[in-house]
Image (spheres, rainbow, N blue to C red):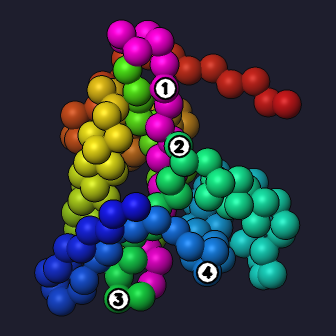
Amino acid sequence: MPTAQRTGYPTSMTITFRAATHDDLPAIVALLAADQLGATREDASEPLADCYIRAFKAMQADANQLLAVAEANGTVIGTMQLTFIPGLSRSGSWRGQIEAVRIAASHRGAGLGRSFFDWAIMQCRERGCSLVQLTTDRSREDAHRFYAQLGFEASHIGYKLRL
């Protein structure tokens, strides 16, 4: 999977967007656990629980999954999961689904999220997707504003059934 680099963020940092590796898992899970929702459902203690290792292996084995990271000078500071979904609707088009987006609190507000999304959307275009979609929790009002600024429209109502 292609990587992309951006220099000058915020001053002399080099940011790299790339596919995650097994070594990135502790940092990714820590990012997932470092917010009000993830704090109640994730376990970032080390060694990582086997459930995270199994999920990562399943994602690596599936060509339509991409767990991505944003890295600054060797440190993971962001993550997201891209899923490429084939479908019959929209004349058999593919969709890119963006989920589990997290940027370290210390790196928010300086354009990293926008650059990460630009990179993700480029990955979707390169895979032939005609649509990029995402879901976000109703309580994440800052995220809603951010996604709207990126051009995403709140066009649907989503439902979930916990199993």
The answer to whether marks 4 and 1 mark residues whose Cβ atoms lie closer than 8 Å is no
Q: CA distance from mark 1 to mark 3?
A: 35 Å
Q: Can you say whether 54 is above or below 156 in the image? A: below
- Which residue is identified by label 1? 86
Query: Any magenta on residue 83?
Result: yes
Identify the magenta region.
75-92
Question: Which is more foreground, mark 4 or mark 1?
Answer: 1
Question: Which is more foreground, mark 2 or mark 3?
Answer: 2
The majority secondary structure of the magenta stretch comes to strand
Question: Regarding mark 4 in the picture, which secondary structure is present there?
Answer: helix
Please say whether residue 5 is visible from this viewpoint: yes
- Which residue is identified by label 4? 23
Q: CA distance from mark 2 to mark 1?
A: 9 Å
Residue 64, which numbered label?
2
The structure residue drawn at horizontal position 65% and vertical position 54%, both measured from the top left corner, is 61
Specify the quadrant of the image occupied by residue 124.
top left
Q: Amino acid at mark 3?
A: Asn
Please say whether residue 38 is visible from this viewpoint: no
